[in-house]
């Protein structure tokens, strides 16, 4: 099966294109324009599993690296010693935090795993995001990161892979050149009756991860 390429705002039925799909891997990538001797870029992936009120029902449905520190996590099955955040219903395994980009090695920079058959019935959509980690939350405590934004990042994309077959089902390359924003909603999974669809969003915000937290919690 060939992969479908979406444009911003387009929707795609996972159930029609991949009947029986249960476990999907969401891969995301980017290419920061780092300057010699400049500050490191650290982009973090997060997800907000929200209900009909557009809010997460409990804290674990805000899927981000900080959940690992709080113990809401599970060891990755293949990369022993690395942990992924996990939701209360065990449907979403968040990304392994990779501040220096060493794990990507030419593949997706970060990924998440979704078991759509386990998603809590109260969850109506899952917003998948990326944000730039800045001072004072960055590893090196470098104040120069405060000036970083998605205008300095090229080749952003999100793709959905059938975890069982390894086939890419759908992909969205974020063609829009952002300017000053430092957080982007890449896409969302949402219910349509008993099925799941994906929408390419590409919606950017100022204020980093905190802006997204304020929207959905």
Image (spheres, grey):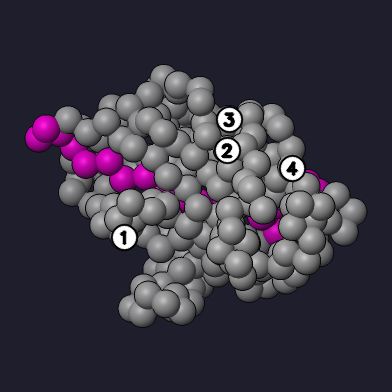
Does residue 31 appear anywhere in the picture?
yes
Tag shown at residue 12: 4
Q: Residue at x 34, y 37 (%)?
A: 31
| Badge 2 density bin: few <14, some 14–19, many ≥20, Cα 10 Å | many
Q: Nearer the viewer, residue 135 or 89?
A: 89
Secondary structure under tag 2 reads strand
Q: Quadrant of residue 162?
A: bottom right
Task: Tell me the crowding category of disc 4: few under 14, some 14 to 19, or many 20 or more residues within 10 angstroms, Cα based.
Answer: some
Q: Residue at x 36, y 31 (%)?
A: 153
- Spatial CA distance of label 4 from label 1 is 29 Å
Q: Tell me the CA gap for discs 1 and 3.
A: 26 Å
Q: Of the residues under marks 4 and 3, which one precedes in the sequence?
A: 4
Residue 102: x %, y % from top left: 26, 57
Q: Which residue is mark 3?
A: 203
Residue placed under numbered mark 1 in the picture: 103
Q: Residue furthest right?
A: 193
Residue 195 drawn in magenta:
no
**Depth order, front residue of 46/177:** 177
Q: Earlier in the sequence, mark 2 or mark 1?
A: 1
Q: Are marks 4 and 3 in contact (CB under 8 Å)?
A: no
Give the residues drawn in magenta, as a range. 36-57
């Amino acid at each position: 099966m060939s992969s479908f390429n979406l444009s911003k705002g387009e929707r795609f039925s996972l159930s029609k294109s991949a009947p029986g799909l249960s476990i999907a891997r969401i891969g995301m990538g980017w290419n920061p324009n780092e300057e010699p001797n400049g500050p490191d870029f650290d982009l973090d992936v997060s997800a907000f599993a929200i209900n009909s009120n557009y809010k997460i029902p409990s804290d674990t449905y805000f899927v981000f690296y900080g959940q690992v520190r709080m113990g809401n996590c599970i060891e990755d099955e293949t990369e022993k010693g690395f942990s992924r955040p996990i939701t209360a219903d065990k449907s979403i395994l968040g990304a392994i935090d990779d501040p220096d980009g060493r794990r990507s090695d030419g593949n997706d920079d970060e990924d998440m795993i979704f078991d759509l058959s386990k998603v809590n019935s109260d969850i109506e959509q899952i917003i998948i995001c990326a944000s730039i980690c800045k001072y004072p939350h960055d590893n090196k405590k470098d104040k120069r990161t405060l000036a970083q934004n998605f205008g300095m990042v090229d080749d952003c994309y999100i793709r959905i892979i059938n975890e069982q077959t390894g086939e890419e089902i759908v992909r969205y390359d974020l063609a829009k050149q952002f300017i000053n924003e430092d957080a982007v909603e890449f896409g969302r999974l949402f219910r349509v009756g008993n099925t799941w669809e994906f929408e390419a969003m590409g919606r950017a915000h100022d204020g980093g991860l905190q802006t997204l937290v304020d929207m959905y919690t």
